[in-house]
Amino acid sequence: MSNASEATPAPQVRIPVGWYVAALALYLVIAYFTKTVLLNWVMGPLFLLLTLYLVPTAAAVVRRRLTARSRP
Amino acid sequence: MSWAAHEFELYFIQKHVGAKASFLAVVVGTQLPDAFTKTFVYAADDPAAFHRGWPGVGFSHSLLFGVLFAAVVLAITKSRAWALGLLIGQWAHVLTDFADTAGVMLFFPFSTEPVTISMWKHAAVEGRYGDAAAYYSSLGGVWDFFWLLVTVVFAWRTLTPAYFREVVVPADPRVWGWLHRTFRLPERGLLLLYQGLMFYGVGRMISWFLYARFDAQTPFQPQWGGPAYIEGNDISDSGWVEVLVRTGIGAALFVAFMWLCWRAFGRRLWERGYDVPAAVRGPGLHAIFDLPSSQRRKASADATVSGG
């Protein structure tokens, strides 16, 4: 435990405000037209995690695999 | 009932409780009164009476319900941070909801008289969409906006990555650590999960407001007791003196009951509980992530033994 405490802290997470604004705009458009999908207590709070972490991470993994396959 | 205010007030509460209570417990506590009841409320013959009255599920909006739930959680988990968080969250929900016309039975079962300031109409009788349109056509929508402003002005710091790392996670390392390990979420993912409730509050407030203005096209009537186009739905026809007397008696009995419970078993339950030891908290997120759960439990036990 002391090793963990003395270790150098990981750098702070930085997410540009623009990404939040873009996610909110996307949320509003989807929520306005499909109310049951996002305006509920399960999907609503998870939307930010989905758009700013899960989708970009999954996209990066797919891109890496495609790049690796296309290499001779 | 309040809508997005329940999400905004979470961060305002977090600012004041700091590391004493778990943020996740406050979230659960805030959602507790509506979690198991809301679906049935819209299907009830008299939604306001069912939601807030007795007979009905109005007991979920009483102070005692929060105390009982917190006591059970404290007895099972021994976590003071969770018990306190649940209690604060549930009480915050109850005290926010007393602003609509249905009110809340604050001191149930010692008084079944709903306490209300009738700022806006409880409109569940209109169904979910109609309820949303009515709420965002009344002072309810203004109430949400007020809480958004309060949170942004006075509690903005609670939304920062540094605050999350240094206060929120160390207050509840077990559950945040579990989320990290189980769902393989790094700090960025956990931060987004934490901020997600604020985001949801803003998103639903704007979405429903736009729905009320452009889809439902309900008149915007932010006056006391509005909106006028909804029928009045107070669940009690008592005069204010009667309400005052019954609520006063209920409050006195509630306080006496709480004191007796504290003397009989509450204090022992609290003393058996634990706070997250400083040794386990470490310097924020980094220490928690590097600590296997077995070691963390051992550290808790050591701290309890040395403390006792």
Image: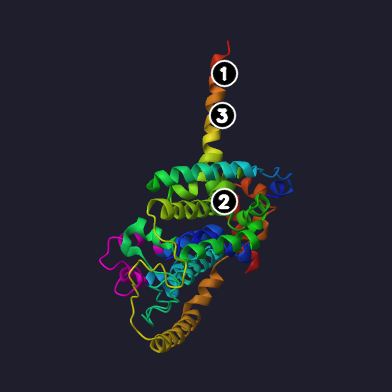
Kindly give the residue lying farthest to the left in the view shown.
Answer: B45
Residue A60 tag number: 3
Residue picked out by circle 1: A68
Query: In the rendered structure, which amino acid carries the disc numbered 3?
Result: Ala
Q: Position of residue A13 (x, y in %)?
A: 66, 44
Which mark lies nearer to you, 3 or 1?
3
N-term-proximal mark, 3 vs 1: 3
Residue B195 tag number: 2
Q: Is A69 in front, or is A31?
A: A31
Q: Is residue B264 above or below residue B30?
A: below
| SS at circle 3 | helix
Spatial CA span between label 2 and label 3? 23 Å
Q: Is B66 in front, or is A56?
A: A56
Q: Where is residue B185 in the image (x, y as percent from the top left)?
A: 55, 42
Q: Is B104 in front, or is B62?
A: B104
Residue in the image at 52% along x and 32% along y: A58
| SS at circle 2 | helix
Q: Position of residue B183 (x, y in %)?
A: 51, 42
Whether labels 2 and 1 belong to a single chain: the reply is no
Query: In the rendered structure, which amino acid carries the disc numbered 2?
Result: Gln
Spatial CA span between label 3 and label 1? 12 Å
